[in-house]
Image (spheres, rainbow, N blue to C red):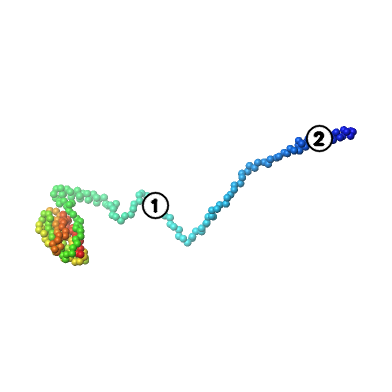
Amino acid sequence: MNRKQFLLFVMVCFTVSSYAQNDFGTTKFKINAPLNTAPAPKKVTPSTAEAAVIKAPNIFKKPDAVLPSASKYQIGEAKSFSMEQTNDFVNPGDRIRDKLNESVSKSLIANGLKEDDSYIRKTDVDFGVIRTKSDFLILRVRDCGNVDGDLIQADLIYDYQHTILVNNLRLGYSYDDIRINLNEGLSYLEVEALNRGQYGGNTGEFRIYDKDGKLLATDFWDNIDKGVKSKFKIIKE
């Protein structure tokens, strides 16, 4: 090979090398890293709440008793306790006896063999309070119905002391006067029926006067039973 051919060969090699650098030297191949598919770790925020305090039990304190609910073991309806008398334990035979007695009594009354006393008052009568400055009072009494043998007894009670004013007084058409001497303060006057009249209960009319003849009270008791009392409270001012 002569010198000219050698130079031409060198120049061709140089030219090819330059094109190779332009095509491959400036091109870069980037290999991407594999994708990370693992879950991202959670970010834990520290709690600002106070830590729970664990308190040791007091072994010297008596535990509170826990009673079971009443409804858990209850059979039937609960009943409240009462001191009042009831008829829960009354003998059924007593009811039958009372009904029979009532029936027989009505039958006897209907046939005129027994007196009907259903209208007879069997409780005391309260005639209220009488106030006076008088040293004594006059109680005037009489029978206000048929004169049928009504008997009364009048008592004055002062400082727990009983004074019989009159006993076995038979009431008639006319008034009978009873004097009542008073002490300072509160006294009680009781007029008791000693029997029933021939035609029914004990009946009577009364009038109460002071020492000057001023009428303080007037009324009557009607068809009261034996032993029933007409009561008055007397205050001497």
Q: Residue 113: x percent and y percent?
A: 14, 50
Residue 87, labelled with which disc? Answer: none
Relative placement, left or right, of 45 versus 231 is right
Position of residue 176 measured from the top left corner of the image (x, y, whole percent): 11, 61
Tell me if mark 1 has few (under 14), some (14-19) or many (20+) residues whose alpha carbon lies within 10 angstroms of its own.
few
- The residue tagged with tag 2: helix, strand or loop? helix
Q: Which residue corresponds to the image point at 28% horizontal and 52% vertical from the top-left? A: 87
Q: Around disc 2, counting alpha carbons within 10 Å, would you say few (fewer than 14), some (14 to 19), or many (20 or more)?
A: few
Marks 1 and 2, the one that precedes in the sequence: 2
Task: Classify the position of the C terminus by image quarter.
Answer: bottom left
Q: Quadrant of residue 208?
A: bottom left
Tell me which residue sits at (31%, 55%) in the image: 82
Tell me the residue that label 2 is attached to. 15
Point 63% across, 43% down: residue: 38
Question: Which mark identifies residue 70?
Answer: 1
Q: Residue 190 is drawn in which quadrant?
A: bottom left
| Most foreground residue, 14 or 90 | 14
> Is label 1 in contact with label 2 (beta carbons under 8 Å)?
no
Q: Quadrant of residue 150?
A: bottom left
SS type, badge 1: helix
Q: Where's residue 127, x and y in %?
A: 19, 58
Residue 194 appears anywhere in the view: no
The front one of 63 and 166 is: 166
CA distance for labels 1 and 2: 112 Å
Q: Which residue is located at x 43 percent, y 55 percent?
A: 66
Q: For the N terminus, which image quadrant?
A: top right
